Image (cartoon, rainbow, N blue to C red):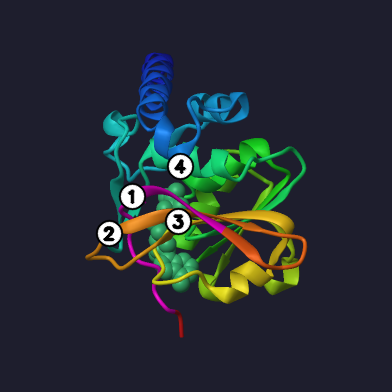
Amino acid sequence: MSAADAQDHAGARARLVFEVDAMYSATRAETGFSAMSPAVRAALGKVERHRFVPSGEEAVAYRNHPLPIGSGQTISQPYIVALSTDLILPQAGQRVLEIGTGSGYQAAMLAEIVGRVYSIELIESLGKAAAAKLAATGYSNVEVRIGDGYKGWPEQAPFDSIVVTAAAPKVPEALVEQLKPGGRMVIPVGGSQEAQQLLLIVKRADGSVERKNVLAVRFVPLVPGK
Ligand code: SAH
């Protein structure tokens, strides 16, 4: 990539931060966030989304839209990625599980802030491509596993937080179990043809959960694994 291209991307990224700020402001009544946290804002301004979109799509990588990434899947809208990251109140040093690696972009956003990211992808070709991109872009604190996200990653549990990036008909019990007490999970719930809600789940010390509807969203479905 030429120096001019790098500069174009930096400019486009700065505009994206501005647009996502505007969306936070417009949705503050629903989400409770009137602005991105400084950590999420910095990560959005830093992660090179053009490296996570399919080749040939770099010029539109910093639009605040989802984009197809092949195999019928999408890289999520930057606003939703930022909001999902803010909702878990990410802290340095935490261990976070992501379900649905997809392009690897959400994993990179998390990896900018927390200590270690464990990400599960059902489709082998996508998971392998994302793992290669994450390694090439220097995110050595992300581990990608090919498998069924419904089951979580019991060997690495418990997690401080879980970010699910595909819509499930209901909250998978295995994921709630793999959250630490006080842990937070963001998950879109609902079918692919009907309204979905982004939910925030907070696990109480006694293991029970508190649920909050955050926002109407549209995600690809979480496919039951075999
Ligand atoms: N986080 C991604 C968004 C990917 S879209 C990004 O930032 O680009 C959702 C992803 O979830 C798809 O790649 C899809 O293949 C994956 N997926 C669907 N069902 C799954 C399951 N049961 N386990 C793991 N991944 C799943």
Query: Do the residues under discs 2 and 4 have CB atoms within 8 angstroms?
Result: no
3 or 1: tag closer to the N-terminus: 3
Q: Amino acid at mark 2?
A: Ala
Cα gap from disc 4 to disc 1, whole angstroms? 14 Å
Ligand 1 closer than 8 Å to the CB at disc 1?
no
Cα gap from disc 3 to disc 1, whole angstroms? 14 Å
Q: Amino acid at mark 1?
A: Ala
The circle on residue 165 is 3
Cα gap from disc 1 to disc 2, whole angstroms? 7 Å
The circle on residue 195 is 2
2 or 3: tag closer to the N-terminus: 3
Q: Amino acid at mark 4?
A: Val
User: What residue does disc 4 label?
Assistant: 81
In magenta, the rendered stretch is 211-224
Q: Residues within 10 Å of mark 3 (few under 14, many from 20)?
A: many
Cα gap from disc 2 to disc 3, whole angstroms? 16 Å
Q: Is residue 144 left or right of residue 53?
A: right
Q: Position of residue 29 (x, y in %)?
A: 41, 33
Q: Is residue 135 left or right of residue 106?
A: right
Q: Position of residue 185 (x, y in %)?
A: 58, 56
- Which one is in front in this view, the residue at disc 2 or the one at disc 3? 2
Ligand 1 closer than 8 Å to the CB at disc 4?
yes
Ligand 1 closer than 8 Å to the CB at disc 3?
yes
Q: Residue at x 33, y 49 (%)?
A: 216
- Which one is in front in this view, the residue at disc 3 or the one at disc 1? 1
Return the residue nearer the eye: 175 or 216: 216
